[in-house]
Image (cartoon, helix red, strand yellow):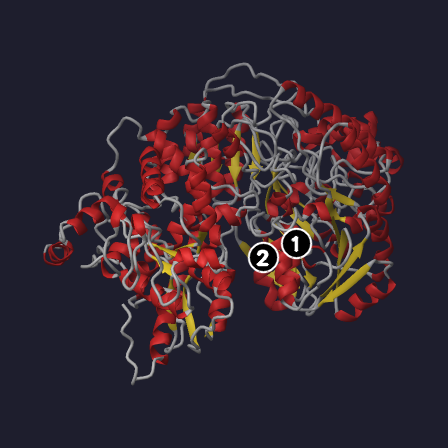
Amino acid sequence: MSARPRRTSADGGRLGAVTTPGEVERTLRAELRGEVDFGAAARALVTMDASNYRRVPLGVVAPRDADDVAAALRVCADAGVPVVPRGGGTSIAGQATGVGVVLDLTRHMDALLSVDPAARTAVVQPGLVLDRLRDAVRPYGLTFGPDPSTHSRCTLGGMIGNNACGAHSVAWGTTADNVTELAVTTYAGAAHRIGTGWDGAPLGLRELVGAHLGLLRTGMPPRFPRRISGYGGLDALLPERGVRLAEAFCGSEGTLGVVTEAVVRLVELPPAPALAVLGYADESAAADAAAGLLPYRPLTVEGMAEDLLGGPAGPVAGAAGVVAGAGGLGGGVAGLPRGRAWLFVEMPDEGGARAVVRGADALDARVLTDPAQQRALWRIREDAAGTATRTPDGRMAWPGWEDCAVPPARLGAYLRDFRALLAAHGLRGTPYGHFGEGCVHVRIDFDLVSAAGVARYRTFSEDLADLVVSHGGSLSGEHGDGQARAELLPKMYGEDVIRLFGAYKDVWDPAGGMNPGMLVRPARLDENLRFEVLPATPFAGEVARCVGVAKCRTSEPGGPGVMCPSYRATGEEQHSTRGRARLLHEMLAGEVVTGGWRSPEVAEALDLCLACKGCRSDCPVGVDMASYKSEFLHHHWAGRIRPLAHYTLGGLPGWLRLIARLRAAGAVNTAVRLLPLPVPGLARERALPELAKRPFTRGVGGRAAGGRAVPAGAREEAGGRPVPAGGREGAAGLEEAGAAAVVVLWPDTFTEYLAPEVGHAALRVLRAADLDVSVPRTRGRVCCGLTYLSTGRLDRARKVLRRTLDTLGDVPGPVTVLEPSCAAALRTDLPALLPDDPRAARLAAAVRTVAETLEEYAPNWRPPRLDRPVVGQTHCHQHAVLGDAADRRLRERAGLVGEPAGGCCGLAGNFGFEPGHHEVSVACAEEQLLPSLRAAPPDALVQADGFSCRTQIAQLGGVRARHLVELLADGLREEVPRSAPDTRP
């Protein structure tokens, strides 16, 4: 490598390479066995964590083991390139970003090396996700005590770096309290094994501590459990505290060295914890009460106020509704006890929880012993990092002052002052958090784009730091300071302690190459903001809403969630919702990803997006990557010849309409069967579904004037308006008499041309419920535009949707849509694409699923009793957009026992038919769907309302799945007496 003079940064460390990035990359590739990637996509994926900050690295290294880590650190030290270790990337203060080399410790160094149940210890690598450790030790009745809300994706190394805590630190302490030994590699590649005592300490550390015993004893702020800021554990090196080197290292935010292995302490898991939920008149009353509950030795004391609920349709309503419906809290907001603020107090057993209720001066209280009810409430807290990013009026709120902490006895007074400070600055936020330890989380609606807004962010930060210190608190209570707060640490510690912090870093990292700009000699808190590089466009605003909490990186199967199937299949960050959002962010910024809308990096990442819309509901901030993908493809292929699949699959409604007009379905089916040649633009591994010889609407009646359909058995009104099929009065008569509206049965493309039997079954069921049904038979001129949306042909989608509105006119009542993806497109995409057409909003509001139609318009109808187990697949779009609560209730009333699989079937419309997608498509199906089919009892019915889901089940599972209306229609047929044959179509 060339020998240039070394440059130094403002913090005194060596920043900026003394050689070219290309030389550093080549040397790393030669020295390491792990991956080295200095490409645009790899760099773009790690420019941000879950904070407000953005820093562009030179490259990313995924070391395979500790030897690789040491080699990487030696190469970077020789080149003067800074290094930042990174785990799950969920840090909220910017400390997981860097301008040099980012070490991705999640790819290879993610093993649980050993567990000793007798000693209650485990040996872990830094990239191990917390939930994997907890799952592995649960059979022994053990767990790892610290449990941040990101437990499904945060790593042990990241927890050590930030000294993470979580809800149960009241009982089990911080990460530092639960680490006994650490293997650490420093910037030049030297290895250290530290625990208790001076063994393994870097040269000069013992002398530094010996020279500053007085300052460590009297100059540090008073200790309380959440004093996490800075090198707050430095006084653990005092002789009277046992010289706990590993404890002092925790919370150093990657600024001292890289943890390559850790021995952690495990704690006993209570077999039957109970949750006492206490209601208070307001937040201050709850905060004042929290400290008084600590003598009961709770496992946790969590607090939140009603503004976190977000109203009846807010983020908590669903989870709290589960609690109410499962036995009922009743009487309060969203099923919680009466009050406007609540404490969640978990105790080891029911007796302890009831003792808390008796002893607490609460307005109202409940005790929950059912695990499902408890999980429903804990989901409120775990998702709060995302749900709190929206203010009640829909504005985004941001981190930055996410986790200040004060002594618990001061919490009530601090929160009152904090709310007043917010108001004085014209800001809003929703505090919640670990009230039992005085730690408050909050996202605030900062304007981090305009110069005036950024200036107010700085002024507020300075004022809040003063407020926290005045209450004897810590600027960080568990997430670390990073760039967000390190500049303000002198307010908390004073200049003498700050100088000691600097000397402590210099002992471990004399060259200053480990994560410079954090904790000591820090960057300014208003530098490197991630928003400043974005253009002022609506799409950029949508992309920026991804805050990086990375719920999309959860890789363990199970549960009803969908997000993110491609990440679950590949394990690659670029195929997570967050990864794609980061690439889009960098595309718009134009610094790292320079191809704009023609970017191959973004195109590659979005290629494996199934457009399942799971992120729309499962992401705490509602990122809608399916819509972002449509927008990208719209621009990416503008003015160019598109992939063939965009014309074949993307234009599917038009092709099917043409085939039906030519009455050529039989010929096409024969050709596909006898000439098994690959269809151009489609995957070779896929067989094409058979076309129906007779479209659905051709089988339900003749054509009326004006292009409207009149179902069989219906009479026509003047002008050709569709009127009801069935035995009751017509639509006009119903309206005059004030009776129920006509139910319009939507002839979606899949039902019309591929599965007309579903449409006929729906007619049978709706008629059995004594509903008046109208079927618009419009020769395929009504369409939701889904296939055009999924291929990014937005102009064509708008044209199709306008034609649909023109053809359909004003609908007389609810529009029942059988295909979930079509219903979702009509409900959400239609008004988004045609925001200025009032007909779009009216049609969207009228859309119902069959179950919703029956529940709303035939509430007294009793479905046939099927009394069978059921398996299958809930369509992704139904999960994400429509919801399946009504379907669950209908299945229960019909005696269908069991639940369709969660996750994604993997076919996802055109996705599974496109070349290059088959492997991921199958992997998605293998996660939950196919195992559930194999495990099903022999007499189980297989239900899947989506045509894609039924196709995937048939092709990969070898069984025929049926729409819910088909199962119900079969039950109705069985109920018809043999002496009275059913003659209805």
Q: Which residue of the protein is positioned furthest toward the bottom in this rendering?
A: 979
Q: Amino acid at mark 2?
A: Leu
Quarter of the picture holding the N terminus: top left
Q: Secondary structure at mark 2?
A: helix
Please indicate whether residue 191 sits to the left or right of residue 355 in the image. Answer: left
Q: Residue at x 21, y 59 (%)?
A: 692
Q: Residues within 10 Å of mark 1 (few under 14, many from 20)?
A: many
Q: Which residue of the protein is positioned furthest toward the top in this rendering?
A: 5
Q: Nearer the viewer, mark 1 or mark 2?
A: 2
Closer to the camera, 668 or 453? 668
Q: Residue at x 66, y 29 (%)?
A: 446
Please indicate whether residue 186 sits to the left or right of residue 34 in the image. Answer: right
Residue 299 pos. (x, y %): 75, 59
Residue 727 pos. (x, y %): 36, 68
The image quadrant of residue 220 is top right
Residue 224 pos. (x, y %): 83, 45
Identify the mark at residue 133; answer none if there is no mark: 2
Assess whether mark 2 and mark 1 are in contact (beta carbons under 8 angstroms).
yes
Residue 574, can we see it? Answer: no
Closer to the camera, 456 or 349? 456
Closer to the camera, 261 or 890? 890
The alpha-carbon separation of the residues under discs 1 and 2 comes to 10 Å
Q: Which residue is mark 1?
A: 264
Q: Residue at x 62, y 19 (%)?
A: 9
Identify the mark at residue 568; answer none if there is no mark: none
Q: Amino acid at mark 1?
A: Val
Mark 1 or mark 2, which has the lower sequence index?
A: 2
Please indicate whether residue 377 sits to the left or right of residue 724 in the image. Answer: right
Residue 285 pos. (x, y %): 84, 49
